[in-house]
Amino acid sequence: MRRAILLWAVACLGLGLGRASADEITLPDGPGRDLVYARCQTCHDLGYLKESSGIPASAWKDILVTMYGFGLRIPDAEKAQIVTYLGTYLGPNPPPAAPAVSTADAAPSLNGGKLFEQNCSACHQKTGKGLPASFPPLAGNSDLFLDRLYPVHVVLNGLTGKIEVGGKTFNGTMPSFAHLDDARLAAILNYVRGAWGNAANAPAGMRPLAAVDVKGLRDQKQTPKEVHGLRASLLK
Amino acid sequence: MMSGRDGEFRFNRRQFGLATSAAGLALSMPGYLRPAFAAGEDSAAVIAGKVSGLIIHNAKLGVMETPLTLLRQHKHTPKEILYSRFHFPHEGEAAWYDTIKAPDFPDWTITIDGLVARPRTVKAADLAGMEQVKRVSVLQCAGNGRAFYAAKQKVAGGQWHNGGMGNIEWEGVPFRPFLEAQKLLVSSGAKWITAHGWDHPATPEGSSFAKSYHIDDPALDNAILALKMNGEPIPAAHGGPVRLIIPGYYGNMNVKQINTILFEAEQSPSVYQSMGYRMPLVPVEPGKFGANDYTLTNSVPTYGHKIKSAIFSPLPEDKPGAGAVEITGVAFNDGRGPITRVEVSSDGGKTWTDAEIEAPESPWAWYHWKAKGTLAKGENTLISRATDSLGRSQPLDGLVWWNPRGYEWNGADHVKVTV
């Protein structure tokens, strides 16, 4: 154990910086939480939400209107879900924390495309083309096939640092999506690997991801910078 | 009380010693670059060059507050500890301002356009050759003190206490003479001057950052296009290479990374001008006036600092003993009239004494003050309240100015210390 801590500390030293906070902030579990994770972190992290917890539901509703001015473009139905979640779980009288329920059992009917739209499209766009200079494209992104499990590391832990995709440089931070369960993450990644012509780039014999692949890496907690390091080592 | 010297940086050894020893590491890294391994959140990892131990309100936006135990140590607030507030993620092509190093943009220009017959583009490098003046001014986030509004009704956003401010020496080119020298031939239809910064939102649908000022705003008479902060090129995180500094105005009015100045008939449509950073003209009530009820006629932008004071010592962290105590702090306003009085109480407002006020470095700088008080066993409430020559004073209960976006807190400062 002590050795593990030392190794971790040395790894941090090597990287020069400790872990930034953005990926550490979690919100109470409840319906609509994942939508908040997916939609609100394009422009800011969840620190503001956490710090604002306790404001009235009406104030959360006002915030969604305010955020339109700051660029939030989501369907009304999603807005309603987010307002309900925030007004309930980050409102003045939040319900007691519910026991953790695994949603992995619901796996059979998972629709990777829909999950992608719900969780990833705010930044990477429905077209998978990303946004120039801000969010890298997934369409035609060769990182998807660096090795079979590399994208799993990214969605579980996030990624930060300078990367080059399709000849363009990006230097952003993707948050962790570890709040999504194993089956959902696998479904999303399989979708992305097959969409927008990406399937043609898949190395022969690379098997689709299964929930168990995600599960196997979930406990191997990495910082977004470490994932950046992993990427560099795979590119060599 | 003032123990720091200008330009010299000191950190709280106890605080950072703890952070490093918790990781079982004895590091010999230089001063403030020491990362805090123990905590998950490390302000030094949010903006390169900042110390560990700042209060992080939003890492992705680089929003961080200075603990008063650090802030009070310096006459001029060093870049390593100064609060920071970006409006957009400091990532991607914006990653360059994610550091307290000076940005390296030799070709930076400022374009002056709009209702002028002769639009101009001026090189920042040429600014350096012009007459430079110094302005010591408090830089303060308009949201500083937002957390105190929660006593009435909590408002959304970063819950700042008193650490969203600093006392800074700026240096640069006087703004109005600079504009006059450009011989722009401004149209009589121009009523507003709008300043745009380089920064821009994460998505194309977002609103770009801009601030507008009345063309004849007297505060602009003191404004400078600043190139230096505390004697050095302005750090990227604090608005370098060029920042518009309007002494006495809230932080957001001092546009960072300024690259465009427009003369216009109307104020900017940016939501940062039309909806954000505004104060209702009259007091409003929670539930009756919401965050989106601001109009150009029922509210005004957060221009000049409301008169304010803050207690710097003793703080709860000082663990003072019972008996006589010297209470110290700072006061400031928008510079329109000097601070003439700071009243201090060490018994929750039952008795008051006038503080001794030091002459400030400038009309817009911190006024340091000190007063004698007495601490009893148990909980003591210290209060400070400033008044200026124009008769403006801090409300004893700052909640009278509650507003749904939580700006311009200036209630008499209350600090509770337990002996």
Image: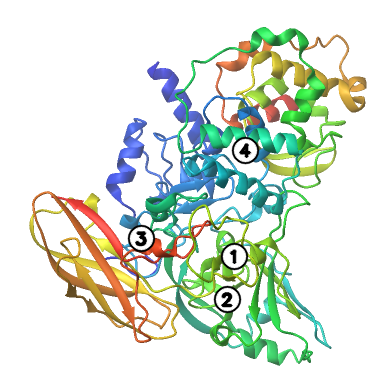
The image quadrant where one finds the C terminus of chain A is: top right
Q: Are marks 4 and 2 in contact (CB under 8 Å)?
A: no
Nearest the viewer among B313 and A65 is A65
- Give the spatial CA distance, label 1 vs label 2: 9 Å
- Give the spatial CA distance, label 4 vs label 1: 35 Å
Seen in the image, is B350 located left or right of residue B214?
left
Q: Position of residue B224 (x, y in %)?
A: 58, 81
The lab-note entry on whether marks 1 and 3 share a chain reads yes
- Give the spatial CA distance, label 1 vs label 3: 20 Å
The lab-note entry on whether marks 4 and 1 share a chain reads no
Q: Position of residue B178 (x, y in %)?
A: 66, 87
Frontmost of labels 4 and 2 is 4
Say whether disc 1 or disc 2 marks the residue closer to the N-terminus. 2
- Give the spatial CA distance, label 3 vs label 4: 38 Å
- Residue B361: assigned label: none
- Give the spatial CA distance, label 3 vs label 2: 22 Å
- Dot 4 corresponds to which residue? A83
Q: Position of residue B230 (x, y in %)?
A: 46, 71
Instruction: Please tell me in which quadrant of the rendered image residue A183 appears.
Output: top right
Q: Are marks 1 and 2 in contact (CB under 8 Å)?
A: yes
- Dot 2 corresponds to which residue? B226
* Within-10-Å neighbours for mark 4: few <14, some 14–19, many 20+: many
Secondary structure beneath disc 2?
Answer: strand
Q: Amino acid at mark 2?
A: Ala
Nearest the viewer among A163 and A183 is A183
Frontmost of labels 4 and 1 is 4
Secondary structure beneath disc 1?
Answer: loop
Residue drawn at the location 66% of the way across and 22% of the way down:
A153
- Dot 1 corresponds to which residue? B239
Subunit of mark 1?
A: B
